[in-house]
Protein backbone atom coordinates (compact mmCIF):
# COMPACT_ATOMS: atom_id res chain seq x y z
CA UNK A 1 0.00 0.00 0.00
CA UNK A 2 1.32 3.41 -0.99
CA UNK A 3 0.40 6.71 -2.57
CA UNK A 4 1.82 7.28 -6.04
CA UNK A 5 2.99 10.88 -6.52
CA UNK A 6 3.50 12.22 -10.04
CA UNK A 7 5.23 15.61 -10.27
CA UNK A 8 4.77 17.73 -13.38
CA UNK A 9 6.35 21.04 -12.31
CA UNK A 10 4.45 24.29 -11.71
CA UNK A 11 4.81 26.92 -9.01
CA UNK A 12 4.81 24.27 -6.26
CA UNK A 13 8.22 23.15 -7.58
CA UNK A 14 9.60 26.53 -8.67
CA UNK A 15 12.35 26.92 -6.12
CA UNK A 16 15.21 28.19 -8.25
CA UNK A 17 16.31 30.58 -10.96
CA UNK A 18 18.19 30.29 -14.24
CA UNK A 19 21.53 32.14 -14.42
CA UNK A 20 21.11 35.56 -15.99
CA UNK A 21 17.32 35.43 -15.97
CA UNK A 22 14.77 36.94 -13.65
CA UNK A 23 11.97 34.83 -12.13
CA UNK A 24 11.61 31.38 -10.61
CA UNK A 25 11.74 28.16 -12.60
CA UNK A 26 11.05 24.54 -11.75
CA UNK A 27 13.86 23.09 -9.68
CA UNK A 28 12.34 20.92 -6.97
CA UNK A 29 11.94 17.19 -7.36
CA UNK A 30 9.27 15.08 -5.75
CA UNK A 31 11.75 14.18 -3.01
CA UNK A 32 12.28 17.90 -2.31
CA UNK A 33 8.52 18.51 -2.25
CA UNK A 34 7.79 15.69 0.16
CA UNK A 35 10.74 16.61 2.40
CA UNK A 36 9.15 20.06 2.88
CA UNK A 37 5.89 18.63 4.26
CA UNK A 38 5.71 18.21 8.03
CA UNK A 39 3.30 15.46 9.00
CA UNK A 40 3.48 13.44 5.79
CA UNK A 41 5.03 10.49 7.66
CA UNK A 42 2.04 10.34 9.97
CA UNK A 43 -0.10 9.29 7.01
CA UNK A 44 1.35 5.82 7.47
CA UNK A 45 1.58 5.24 3.71
CA UNK A 46 4.83 5.67 1.79
CA UNK A 47 4.86 8.01 -1.19
CA UNK A 48 6.08 6.43 -4.37
CA UNK A 49 7.48 9.46 -6.22
CA UNK A 50 7.62 9.65 -10.02
CA UNK A 51 9.18 12.86 -11.34
CA UNK A 52 7.50 13.08 -14.72
CA UNK A 53 7.69 16.65 -16.07
CA UNK A 54 9.37 19.80 -14.77
CA UNK A 55 7.50 22.49 -16.68
CA UNK A 56 5.11 25.39 -16.21
CA UNK A 57 1.62 23.99 -16.73
CA UNK A 58 1.19 26.09 -19.87
CA UNK A 59 3.60 23.64 -21.54
CA UNK A 60 1.65 20.46 -20.78
CA UNK A 61 -0.02 18.52 -23.58
CA UNK A 62 -3.00 16.15 -23.71
CA UNK A 63 -0.62 13.37 -24.71
CA UNK A 64 1.58 13.93 -21.63
CA UNK A 65 -1.44 14.05 -19.35
CA UNK A 66 -2.92 10.87 -20.80
CA UNK A 67 0.46 9.20 -20.24
CA UNK A 68 0.30 10.29 -16.58
CA UNK A 69 -3.23 8.90 -16.25
CA UNK A 70 -2.03 5.62 -17.77
CA UNK A 71 0.91 5.42 -15.37
CA UNK A 72 -1.39 6.32 -12.46
CA UNK A 73 -3.76 3.61 -13.55
CA UNK A 74 -0.96 1.06 -13.60
CA UNK A 75 0.11 2.20 -10.12
CA UNK A 76 -3.41 1.61 -8.79
CA UNK A 77 -3.65 -1.76 -10.50
CA UNK A 78 -0.34 -2.65 -8.84
CA UNK A 79 -1.79 -1.80 -5.41
CA UNK A 80 -1.50 1.96 -4.80
CA UNK A 81 -4.24 3.24 -2.50
CA UNK A 82 -4.49 6.53 -4.37
CA UNK A 83 -2.59 8.93 -6.58
CA UNK A 84 -1.49 12.56 -6.25
CA UNK A 85 -0.46 14.70 -9.22
CA UNK A 86 1.30 18.03 -8.64
CA UNK A 87 1.32 20.54 -11.47
CA UNK A 88 1.00 24.23 -12.22
CA UNK A 89 -2.32 25.75 -11.35
CA UNK A 90 -2.85 27.59 -14.63
CA UNK A 91 -4.14 24.58 -16.55
CA UNK A 92 -4.96 22.35 -13.58
CA UNK A 93 -8.74 22.63 -14.10
CA UNK A 94 -8.34 21.28 -17.64
CA UNK A 95 -5.86 18.53 -16.69
CA UNK A 96 -8.02 17.30 -13.82
CA UNK A 97 -11.14 17.27 -16.01
CA UNK A 98 -9.29 15.45 -18.78
CA UNK A 99 -8.15 12.82 -16.27
CA UNK A 100 -11.66 12.56 -14.82
CA UNK A 101 -13.12 11.79 -18.24
CA UNK A 102 -10.94 8.69 -18.59
CA UNK A 103 -10.22 7.60 -14.98
CA UNK A 104 -11.80 4.17 -14.46
CA UNK A 105 -10.83 3.48 -10.85
CA UNK A 106 -12.48 3.76 -7.46
CA UNK A 107 -9.11 4.90 -6.06
CA UNK A 108 -8.79 8.69 -5.79
CA UNK A 109 -6.67 10.60 -8.30
CA UNK A 110 -6.01 13.98 -6.69
CA UNK A 111 -4.49 17.06 -8.35
CA UNK A 112 -2.84 19.87 -6.44
CA UNK A 113 -0.26 22.64 -6.81
CA UNK A 114 0.59 25.98 -5.24
CA UNK A 115 0.03 29.67 -5.78
CA UNK A 116 2.98 30.89 -3.68
CA UNK A 117 6.32 29.48 -4.76
CA UNK A 118 8.77 27.93 -2.27
CA UNK A 119 11.02 31.04 -2.24
CA UNK A 120 8.22 33.22 -0.80
CA UNK A 121 7.12 33.64 2.79
CA UNK A 122 4.17 31.32 3.41
CA UNK A 123 4.34 29.00 0.41
CA UNK A 124 1.12 26.97 0.18
CA UNK A 125 2.62 23.96 -1.64
CA UNK A 126 3.46 21.84 1.43
CA UNK A 127 -0.03 22.24 2.94
CA UNK A 128 -1.67 21.48 -0.39
CA UNK A 129 0.49 18.41 -0.95
CA UNK A 130 -0.33 17.13 2.53
CA UNK A 131 -4.06 17.71 1.96
CA UNK A 132 -3.90 15.95 -1.42
CA UNK A 133 -2.06 12.96 0.08
CA UNK A 134 -4.66 12.74 2.85
CA UNK A 135 -7.44 12.75 0.28
CA UNK A 136 -5.65 10.14 -1.85
CA UNK A 137 -5.38 7.90 1.22
CA UNK A 138 -8.92 8.45 2.50
CA UNK A 139 -11.57 5.71 2.27
CA UNK A 140 -14.19 8.50 2.13
CA UNK A 141 -12.68 9.88 -1.08
CA UNK A 142 -13.03 6.62 -2.99
CA UNK A 143 -15.31 6.47 -6.01
CA UNK A 144 -15.52 10.25 -6.36
CA UNK A 145 -13.58 10.40 -9.62
CA UNK A 146 -10.74 12.85 -10.02
CA UNK A 147 -10.44 15.50 -7.32
CA UNK A 148 -8.57 18.72 -6.70
CA UNK A 149 -7.30 19.34 -3.15
CA UNK A 150 -6.32 22.95 -2.54
CA UNK A 151 -6.42 25.26 0.47
CA UNK A 152 -7.95 22.41 2.48
CA UNK A 153 -10.92 22.19 0.14
CA UNK A 154 -11.76 19.23 -2.06
CA UNK A 155 -13.28 19.92 -5.47
CA UNK A 156 -14.68 17.60 -8.11
CA UNK A 157 -12.63 17.89 -11.30
CA UNK A 158 -15.77 18.33 -13.36
CA UNK A 159 -16.78 21.50 -11.55
CA UNK A 160 -13.55 23.14 -10.39
CA UNK A 161 -12.27 26.44 -11.80
CA UNK A 162 -9.18 28.57 -11.24
CA UNK A 163 -10.94 31.81 -10.32
CA UNK A 164 -8.14 34.19 -9.27
CA UNK A 165 -4.69 34.85 -10.73
CA UNK A 166 -2.84 35.08 -7.39
CA UNK A 167 -5.06 34.10 -4.44
CA UNK A 168 -4.23 30.90 -2.57
CA UNK A 169 -7.99 30.30 -2.47
CA UNK A 170 -8.13 30.40 -6.26
CA UNK A 171 -9.87 27.06 -6.80
CA UNK A 172 -13.65 27.10 -6.52
CA UNK A 173 -16.59 25.22 -7.95
CA UNK A 174 -19.05 28.02 -8.74
CA UNK A 175 -21.87 25.69 -9.74
CA UNK A 176 -21.60 23.24 -6.90
CA UNK A 177 -19.24 24.28 -4.12
CA UNK A 178 -16.49 22.02 -2.79
CA UNK A 179 -17.38 18.35 -2.36
CA UNK A 180 -15.38 18.17 0.85
CA UNK A 181 -12.87 19.66 3.22
CA UNK A 182 -9.76 18.59 5.06
CA UNK A 183 -10.52 19.48 8.67
CA UNK A 184 -7.91 18.99 11.38
CA UNK A 185 -6.28 16.47 9.09
CA UNK A 186 -9.50 14.50 8.53
CA UNK A 187 -11.06 14.17 5.09
CA UNK A 188 -14.72 15.14 5.28
CA UNK A 189 -16.78 14.47 2.17
CA UNK A 190 -19.89 16.66 1.96
CA UNK A 191 -21.30 15.68 -1.42
CA UNK A 192 -20.80 12.70 -3.73
CA UNK A 193 -21.01 13.60 -7.41
CA UNK A 194 -22.53 10.88 -9.53
CA UNK A 195 -19.81 9.15 -11.55
CA UNK A 196 -19.98 8.68 -15.29
CA UNK A 197 -18.65 5.92 -17.50
CA UNK A 198 -15.10 6.70 -18.69
CA UNK A 199 -14.87 7.89 -22.30
CA UNK A 200 -13.86 5.32 -24.90
CA UNK A 201 -10.10 5.00 -25.36
CA UNK A 202 -8.41 7.80 -27.24
CA UNK A 203 -6.50 6.98 -30.43
CA UNK A 204 -3.20 8.71 -29.66
CA UNK A 205 -2.21 9.09 -33.31
CA UNK A 206 -5.56 10.75 -34.01
CA UNK A 207 -5.29 12.90 -30.87
CA UNK A 208 -2.20 14.58 -32.27
CA UNK A 209 -4.05 15.63 -35.39
CA UNK A 210 -7.43 16.58 -33.87
CA UNK A 211 -7.77 20.33 -33.51
CA UNK A 212 -10.55 22.06 -31.60
CA UNK A 213 -10.91 25.84 -31.70
CA UNK A 214 -12.37 28.05 -28.98
CA UNK A 215 -13.96 31.35 -29.93
CA UNK A 216 -14.95 33.76 -27.19
CA UNK A 217 -17.66 36.09 -28.41
CA UNK A 218 -17.26 39.80 -27.59
CA UNK A 219 -19.34 42.96 -28.01
CA UNK A 220 -19.60 44.00 -31.67
CA UNK A 221 -17.75 40.81 -32.70
CA UNK A 222 -17.58 40.65 -36.49
CA UNK A 223 -16.83 36.92 -36.48
CA UNK A 224 -13.77 37.38 -38.71
CA UNK A 225 -11.82 34.81 -36.69
CA UNK A 226 -14.36 32.15 -37.63
CA UNK A 227 -13.54 32.38 -41.34
CA UNK A 228 -12.07 29.13 -42.54
CA UNK A 229 -12.19 27.42 -39.12
CA UNK A 230 -13.81 24.28 -40.58
CA UNK A 231 -10.86 23.90 -42.95
CA UNK A 232 -8.31 23.90 -40.14
CA UNK A 233 -10.20 22.46 -37.15
CA UNK A 234 -12.34 19.41 -36.46
CA UNK A 235 -14.52 21.04 -33.83
CA UNK A 236 -15.35 24.44 -32.35
CA UNK A 237 -16.39 25.63 -28.91
CA UNK A 238 -18.16 28.98 -28.76
CA UNK A 239 -18.03 30.89 -25.48
CA UNK A 240 -21.15 32.96 -25.90
CA UNK A 241 -22.67 35.74 -23.87
CA UNK A 242 -24.75 34.90 -20.80
CA UNK A 243 -26.98 31.88 -21.32
CA UNK A 244 -25.53 31.20 -24.80
CA UNK A 245 -26.09 34.17 -27.08
CA UNK A 246 -24.07 35.67 -29.94
CA UNK A 247 -24.38 38.77 -32.17
CA UNK A 248 -26.79 38.28 -35.08
CA UNK A 249 -23.98 38.81 -37.62
CA UNK A 250 -22.26 35.63 -36.41
CA UNK A 251 -25.31 33.43 -36.85
CA UNK A 252 -24.98 32.48 -40.55
CA UNK A 253 -21.30 31.58 -40.10
CA UNK A 254 -21.96 29.50 -36.98
CA UNK A 255 -24.89 27.72 -38.62
CA UNK A 256 -22.73 26.89 -41.65
CA UNK A 257 -19.90 25.67 -39.42
CA UNK A 258 -22.29 23.47 -37.43
CA UNK A 259 -23.20 21.76 -40.69
CA UNK A 260 -19.55 20.78 -41.19
CA UNK A 261 -18.00 20.23 -37.74
CA UNK A 262 -19.39 19.85 -34.20
CA UNK A 263 -19.91 23.30 -32.69
CA UNK A 264 -20.57 23.45 -28.94
CA UNK A 265 -22.23 26.44 -27.31
CA UNK A 266 -21.03 27.43 -23.83
CA UNK A 267 -21.20 30.53 -21.65
CA UNK A 268 -18.30 32.91 -21.17
CA UNK A 269 -19.64 34.01 -17.76
CA UNK A 270 -17.73 31.50 -15.61
CA UNK A 271 -20.73 29.96 -13.90
CA UNK A 272 -24.21 28.73 -14.71
CA UNK A 273 -25.55 26.86 -17.72
CA UNK A 274 -26.35 27.57 -21.33
CA UNK A 275 -30.17 27.57 -21.48
CA UNK A 276 -32.21 25.49 -23.91
CA UNK A 277 -35.60 27.06 -24.51
CA UNK A 278 -35.95 30.53 -22.99
CA UNK A 279 -34.91 33.18 -25.55
CA UNK A 280 -36.05 33.38 -29.16
CA UNK A 281 -34.11 36.20 -30.89
CA UNK A 282 -31.66 35.62 -33.73
CA UNK A 283 -28.42 34.55 -32.04
CA UNK A 284 -30.20 33.22 -28.95
CA UNK A 285 -29.78 29.70 -27.59
CA UNK A 286 -32.95 28.42 -29.31
CA UNK A 287 -31.85 29.89 -32.64
CA UNK A 288 -28.34 28.46 -32.39
CA UNK A 289 -29.56 25.01 -31.37
CA UNK A 290 -31.99 25.02 -34.31
CA UNK A 291 -29.02 25.73 -36.56
CA UNK A 292 -27.20 22.68 -35.23
CA UNK A 293 -25.05 23.96 -32.37
CA UNK A 294 -24.74 21.54 -29.45
CA UNK A 295 -25.62 22.75 -25.96
CA UNK A 296 -22.63 22.58 -23.56
CA UNK A 297 -24.91 22.71 -20.50
CA UNK A 298 -22.96 23.48 -17.34
CA UNK A 299 -19.57 22.89 -18.92
CA UNK A 300 -17.38 25.99 -19.14
CA UNK A 301 -15.66 26.63 -22.49
CA UNK A 302 -12.35 25.09 -21.43
CA UNK A 303 -13.88 21.85 -20.20
CA UNK A 304 -16.10 21.67 -23.28
CA UNK A 305 -12.96 21.91 -25.41
CA UNK A 306 -11.30 19.04 -23.50
CA UNK A 307 -14.38 16.84 -23.87
CA UNK A 308 -14.82 17.60 -27.56
CA UNK A 309 -11.17 16.92 -28.39
CA UNK A 310 -11.13 13.60 -26.50
CA UNK A 311 -14.37 12.53 -28.20
CA UNK A 312 -13.04 13.40 -31.64
CA UNK A 313 -9.77 11.61 -30.81
CA UNK A 314 -11.78 8.53 -29.85
CA UNK A 315 -13.45 8.61 -33.26
CA UNK A 316 -16.90 9.63 -31.96
CA UNK A 317 -19.45 10.67 -34.56
CA UNK A 318 -21.95 13.50 -34.33
CA UNK A 319 -24.61 11.51 -32.43
CA UNK A 320 -22.12 10.20 -29.88
CA UNK A 321 -20.75 13.71 -29.40
CA UNK A 322 -24.25 15.11 -28.90
CA UNK A 323 -25.05 12.33 -26.40
CA UNK A 324 -21.79 12.94 -24.51
CA UNK A 325 -22.58 16.64 -24.10
CA UNK A 326 -26.02 15.75 -22.76
CA UNK A 327 -24.35 13.39 -20.26
CA UNK A 328 -21.50 15.66 -19.19
CA UNK A 329 -23.02 19.09 -19.73
N1 LIG B 1 2.37 29.55 -14.05
C1 LIG B 1 2.32 28.51 -13.07
C2 LIG B 1 1.99 27.20 -13.74
O1 LIG B 1 0.84 26.95 -14.02
C3 LIG B 1 1.33 28.86 -12.05
C4 LIG B 1 1.18 27.89 -10.92
O2 LIG B 1 1.72 26.82 -10.86
O3 LIG B 1 0.46 28.27 -10.02
O4 LIG B 1 2.88 26.42 -13.96
Image (tube, helix red, strand yellow):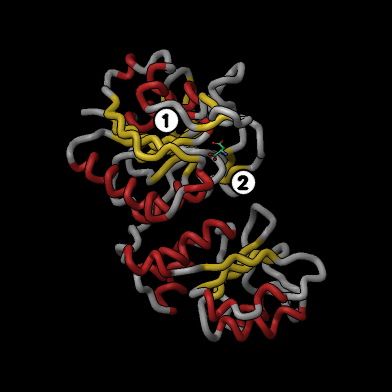
Disc 2 is placed on an element classified as loop
Residue drawn at the location 59% of the way across and 43% of the way down? 162
Residue drawn at the location 39% of the way across and 14% of the way down? 39
Q: Quick check: is the Cβ at mark 1 less than 8 Å away from ligand 1?
A: no
Identify the image quadrant of the N terminus. Answer: top left
Seen in the picture, residue 146 relative to 242 is either above or below; the reply is: above
Q: Which mark, residue 174?
A: 2
Q: Which mark, residue 149?
A: none
Quadrant in the rendering for residue 199: bottom left
* Crowd rating for badge 1 (residues with CA inside 10 Å; few <14, some 14–19, many 20+): many
Image location of residue 294, percent across then percent down: 55, 74
Residue underneath mark 1: 132
For the residue pair 194 and 291, the one nearer the viewer reads as 291
Residue drawn at the location 33% of the way across and 36% of the way down? 83
Give the left or right position of residue 205, taking residue 61 as reference.
left
Disc 1 is placed on an element classified as helix
Amino acid sequence: MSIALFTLGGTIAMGGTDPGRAGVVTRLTGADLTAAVPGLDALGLPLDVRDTQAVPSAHLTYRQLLDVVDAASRAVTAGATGVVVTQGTDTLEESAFLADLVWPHVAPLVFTGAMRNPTLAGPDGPANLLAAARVAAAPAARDLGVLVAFADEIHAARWVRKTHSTSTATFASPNAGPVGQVLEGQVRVLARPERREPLPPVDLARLDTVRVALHTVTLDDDGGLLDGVAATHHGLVVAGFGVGHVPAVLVPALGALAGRIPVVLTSRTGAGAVLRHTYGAVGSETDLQRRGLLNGGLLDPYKAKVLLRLLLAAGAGRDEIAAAFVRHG
